[in-house]
Image (spheres, rainbow, N blue to C red):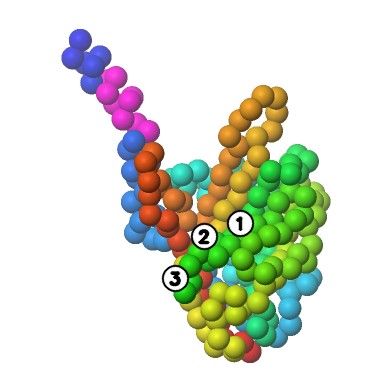
Amino acid sequence: MHRRRVAWMQEGFAPFFEEAGLAHKWLRNPPACTVAAVKAAPAEDAAWQALPVASLVEGNYGKEPDLATQVRMARHGDTIHVRVEAAEPTALAKEDRLTLRVQQLGKTLSLTANGEGKVQGELGATLLGSTQKGGVWTVAVSFPAAAVGLEPGKPGAMDAQIERHRAHRGAGKGRGTDYFWMPPMKPPWDWPPRFGKLRVEATQ
């Protein structure tokens, strides 16, 4: 009886230990990425692929994602350019969302693009393109560097979170799937927001 009880407890605590292991990994090593300064705004795929990449993980504690989501950023003059490549094997849904949140000057500012290619938020972003080809949803936007408190030409750093919400597919209701750059690791009641670090280079 005692053996069965211990086995039952081991099984019950397995998810806890898995989440705890992931949490300790992220708390010790929050992600960081460079926003590279470039002489020309990236337009061709090769120019984007040469930039540093931020990859999203899946779920509250950041397990390996079932669908890859990669984000690259560049600073050209006093404009920040962002491109997201999100693996998406099915048709886009209106509720699909890509979000960048930046904590700067005591505020959290954001921009969000949805599956219809609409962009909104406090960063005054401009949509440069939203396409789906070869099983990849690609979104490119730009916004003024001043919107996140960057001084003209000077380097800077900011706390940031990148999120993807993939709406539920299939029949019936579902919660969908969430991906994060820095897993929130939120308990059921409340949690402090968690961010990675963006380091922005001075303009060239």
Taking the spot 73% from the left edge, 64% from the top edge, the residue there is 140
Between the residue at mark 1 and the residue at mark 3, the CA separation in whole angstroms equals 19 Å
Report whether residue 5 is seen.
yes
Q: Earlier in the sequence, mark 1 or mark 2?
A: 1
| Residue annotated with mark 1 | 99
Q: Is residue 187 left or right of residue 99?
A: left
Taking the spot 65% from the left edge, 39% from the top edge, the residue there is 167
Report whether residue 71 is seen.
no
* Residue nearest the observer in this picture, 35 or 105: 105
Q: Of the numbered discs in the image, which one, if any, rests on residue 123?
A: none
Q: Amino acid at mark 1?
A: Thr
- How far across and how far down the image is residue 89, in percent? 74, 41
Taking the spot 34% from the left edge, 59% from the top edge, the residue there is 28
Is residue 53 located in the magenta-colored stretch of the structure? no
**Crowd class of label 1 (few under 14; some 14 to 19; many from 20; radius 10 Å):** many
Q: Amino acid at mark 2?
A: Gln
Q: Earlier in the sequence, mark 2 or mark 3?
A: 3
